[in-house]
Amino acid sequence: MKSKLGLASILFIGATLILKVSGLLRDMVIAYYFGDSYIADAYLAAFIIPNMLILFMQNGMKNALVPSYIDAKEEKRGKSHLGQVFKGTAGLAFVFSILGMLLAPLMIRLFYPDFSEPATEIATWVTVIFFSCIAFVGMNSVLEAFFDAENKFALSIVSQIIVILSSILGAFLFANQIGAYSLAFGYLAGTIFSLIFKSFIVIPQRALSLKQKMDWPEVRKFYWVFLPVGLTVAVGQVNLMVGSIFASYQGEGAVTYINYAKNLVHMPQGIFGVTIATIIFPMLSKAITTNDTGQFKKGIEKGLTTMYLVLLPAIIGMMLLMPNLIELFYERGAFNNSATAATSQVAYFYFGSVLFFSLNNIINKGFYTMKKGHLILIISLGSILLNIVFNFIFAEWLGYLGIPLAASLMALFYTGACLIVFVKLVGGLDFKYITIDYTKITAAALVMSGAVLGLQQGIGNFPNLVQIILVAIVGAIAFATTAFLLKADAFLFLLNQVRRRKKKGGVS
């Protein structure tokens, strides 16, 4: 059983890495065809609105359906429960789809009044196309959650990769004919292909029953659990939309710079966060099951220090290489050198956002493990107001550079509020241990920065890709060596985990 879970975790991490890379490829395609023009601004701004609902369904469904399906399966009614949720979600998603398509013109003019008429037209029709996907997204989200409940984690990620690759293919085939609409139609086709892919797996297994009448009390009971979790995810998207709205007042290209920089800087959070979760969270679940509060708190502390260990050098390395990375990934086609410079400047201000939100992922998992997710929702709602205030202040002062700064400061206050509430819930954490390890990790990161800056002085004339590779190698060696010599506990913990996995692999 453990070997199967271990294989599932490895496949999940690998599939997640591919998903992040495919997402980066999609941004590269947008940059190539549309650069930092009003067309890119309109497409990216329009996508945020329906994507709020997409993530609401996908992530909310996984957090709500997995435990409810497992419980129903134990009671020998797993197929029935899955069928009820599938039908209820399909109906609800269809209603959202129709409403979104009808309200698209109003929403675009309300949220982006400063867009030009051509940009408004593109954004409106892109929004219509994306809302037409919602009906398929709803059904996809239920089946993805089912795969997770069956420990087939990679399948749900693969189905998301299908959607992204379909968007990219749509652009390759039709961008010169229909512009940004090619990406939106590609996404629509991807949601349909993804549903067909899942159906070929689910139908032969007879995993769900759709013949029985709707059991509305069961569906309502499920959605009472689903809504708080889904809304918490939606709050994050609302905050992204707030930034996009303020960027739309900053002239052509601002929305594009914000989106490209955010997606690139947050890549380490998506990749490394999954790996750390795989190592840390079984410890949390076991501690809660056995009512071992000490072990639970130790798991949170390990998570916070391990996340800091992995993310801090990754983010600092990206900051030191940011112009090189943006040139490598985006600077081709319609995306020129001035767009690279502007996107790089924006990316620097996202440093706090990715660091604090990554650390907060650990704290949030603690809340969810304790079944206190509603507290995160309350704090998250407050973060929207704070984000609006910060954007008013800093966008007025710094232009579009103030938008990522507002996001970073909001992330700091949001994480601080979550930490304070969580500490009160669990009766304190060992902050002495956390502070000592953070100090050692920070010292290692400073040594790494010095080594990288010194290296960069001598390789400025080297090809861009060679610079990136040399900096990555030297930076990794400098950081790992210093962390080892300082005996940073998080580093030794990860090293021990790697050694254990190698021993298990050797035994088998």
Image (tube, rainbow, N blue to C red):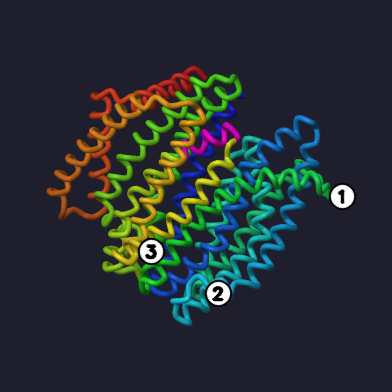
Residue 391 falls in which quadrant of the image? Answer: bottom left
Instruction: Give residue 228's position: percent from left, percent from top.
Output: 62, 46
Q: Amino acid at mark 1?
A: Lys
Q: Is residue 27 above or below residue 371?
A: below
Q: Which residues are magenta?
A: 361-371
User: Which numbered disc flags the more N-terminal residue, 1 or 3?
Assistant: 1
Instruction: Give residue 427's position: percent from left, percent from top.
Output: 48, 26
Predominant secondary structure, magenta span: helix
Residue marked by disc 1: 213
The disc at residue 124 is: 2
Image side of residue 381 versus residue 255, left or right = right
Q: Check if residue 368 falls in the magenta segment.
A: yes
Work out which residue is located at the far left of the displayed protein and give it: 458
Instruction: Give residue 117's position: percent from left, percent from top.
Output: 48, 82
Residue 497 falls in which quadrant of the image? Answer: top left
Q: Is residue 216 above or below residue 169?
A: above
Instruction: Give residue 225's position: percent from left, percent from top.
Output: 67, 43
Are dots 2 and 1 in contact, CB under 8 Å?
no
**Taking the image as drawn, is residue 474 in sight?**
no
Q: Check if residue 106 falls in the magenta segment.
A: no
Q: Is residue 28 above or below residue 37?
A: above
Q: Amino acid at mark 2?
A: Thr
- Decide which of 203, 313 is in the foreground and name it: 313
Q: Amino acid at mark 3?
A: Phe
Residue marked by disc 3: 392
